[in-house]
Amino acid sequence: MTTTEGSIHELVEHRLRQSDLRYTPGRRAIVELLLRRGQPASIADVEAALPQVPRSSAYRHLVDLQGVGVVRRVAANDDFTRFELAEDLTEHHHHLLCTSCGSVTDVTPTEAFEHAVHAMVEEFSRQEGFAPLSHSLDVLGHCQRCR
Amino acid sequence: MTTTEGSIHELVEHRLRQSDLRYTPGRRAIVELLLRRGQPASIADVEAALPQVPRSSAYRHLVDLQGVGVVRRVAANDDFTRFELAEDLTEHHHHLLCTSCGSVTDVTPTEAFEHAVHAMVEEFSRQEGFAPLSHSLDVLGHCQRCR
DNA sequence: CCATAGAACAAGACTCAGTCTCAATACAAC
DNA sequence: GTTGTATTGAGACTGAGTCTTGTTCTATGG
């Protein structure tokens, strides 16, 4: 999927409106930061990039945006929760997690691989009576800088 | 891989010894619990099953066991870190994460699927200069009880 | 215009999972 | 036994994340 930046903001605004929420400058700053980074961001990243946004507001914005399906939480390998734009605003991807520095890198799978994943997920779901919504492959290892 | 319970304890003891650590009753109780459950356990699970082990000791044991490669941390979808035996003591598996109750269920992949994963991980690593160590597919959705 | 109701916001108090400290105890080797 | 090292329990401590409160913005309508 190739979504233009403009249409993303329209979509975000629309989803917020559905829940009687406004697309305010604070919320927009968060979304633009996540768009710009293209990688999951921790609260520390947000604070560094947007010093004018108080921590409590940043958390609240992220929770609100998560509530309307614009933002997703990513559990990294260190103590910090990270946030990224939901996949339907960007594209489906997986994560490389560095066990040394905790960094998270997005990578895009091939179609062939995704077919294999879907078949496997189907099988798991049948076995366990589980209703799947999404999936993510996490690869643990050492990033270029840490190896 | 089919590892008997006895050989697991020998292996754990050996790995601890390598780091001048003893396989004490407290540590053994943790390992036995994780073996018995066969599923990732949170600290609350450990406390419930082993009320005689103080929380601080349970955490310390888990950290020690993680340090010698016997235990692995699992980031679930709720606020609680979970712990499971390292894959080389059990067998390679993936996780079904319930976004409603936070439960984590282990599932074992087919060989064909693992081949596809290895090829994809190879490709990611080449692209990003990343040195992979292990991987895990997390499927988000609703478990049988919550759906 | 002004009023008003609900959303947004900043600041800081608060929670609690997880870590650290320290004094006491067990154990292994000599 | 003595000594050095690992282990343990209890509780203090840390800090990411949440909640509360009082204030400010903004949309609507009279």
Image (cartoon, coloured by chain):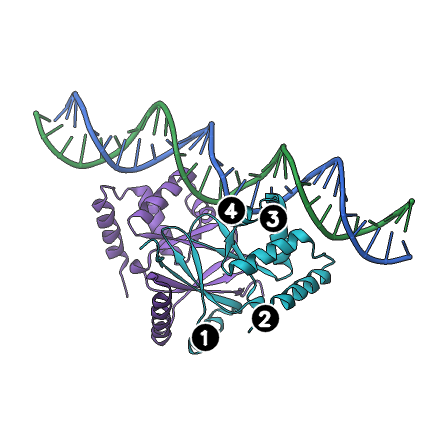
Chain colours: A purple, B cyan, C blue, D green
Q: Nearer the viewer, residue B99 or B123?
A: B99
Comparing labels 3 and 2, the label whose residue is closer to the camera: 2
Q: CA distance from mark 2 to mark 1?
A: 20 Å
Residue on which the image places disc 4: B44
Quadrant where the N terminus of chain A sits is: bottom left
Amino acid under disc 4: Ala
Amino acid under disc 2: Thr
Whether label 2 touches label 4, CB < 8 Å: no
Asked whether residue B63 appears in the rendered view, the answer is no
Determine the chain carrying the residue at label 4: B
Quadrant where the C terminus of chain A sits is: bottom right
Q: Nearer the viewer, residue B17 or B130?
A: B17
Residue at 35% from the left image edge and 65% from the top image edge: A125
Give the class, few, some or many, for how many residues have Cα within 10 Å of label 2's Cα (few <14, many ≥20). Answer: few
Amino acid under disc 3: Ala
Q: CA distance from mark 2 to mark 4?
A: 27 Å
Secondary structure category for the residue under label 2: loop
Whether label 3 touches label 2, CB < 8 Å: no
Residue at 66% from the left image edge and 66% from the top image edge: B11
Q: CA distance from mark 1 to mark 4?
A: 32 Å
Q: Answer with mark 1 or mark 4, whichever residue precedes in sequence.
A: 4
Whether label 2 touches label 1, CB < 8 Å: no
Residue A65, image x, y percentages: 32, 47
Residue on which the image places disc 2: B3
Determine the chain carrying the residue at label 3: B
Q: Answer with mark 3 or mark 1, whichever residue precedes in sequence.
A: 3
Residue on which the image places disc 1: B114
Q: CA distance from mark 3 to mark 1?
A: 34 Å
Amino acid under disc 1: Glu
Q: Answer with mark 3 or mark 2, whichever residue precedes in sequence.
A: 2
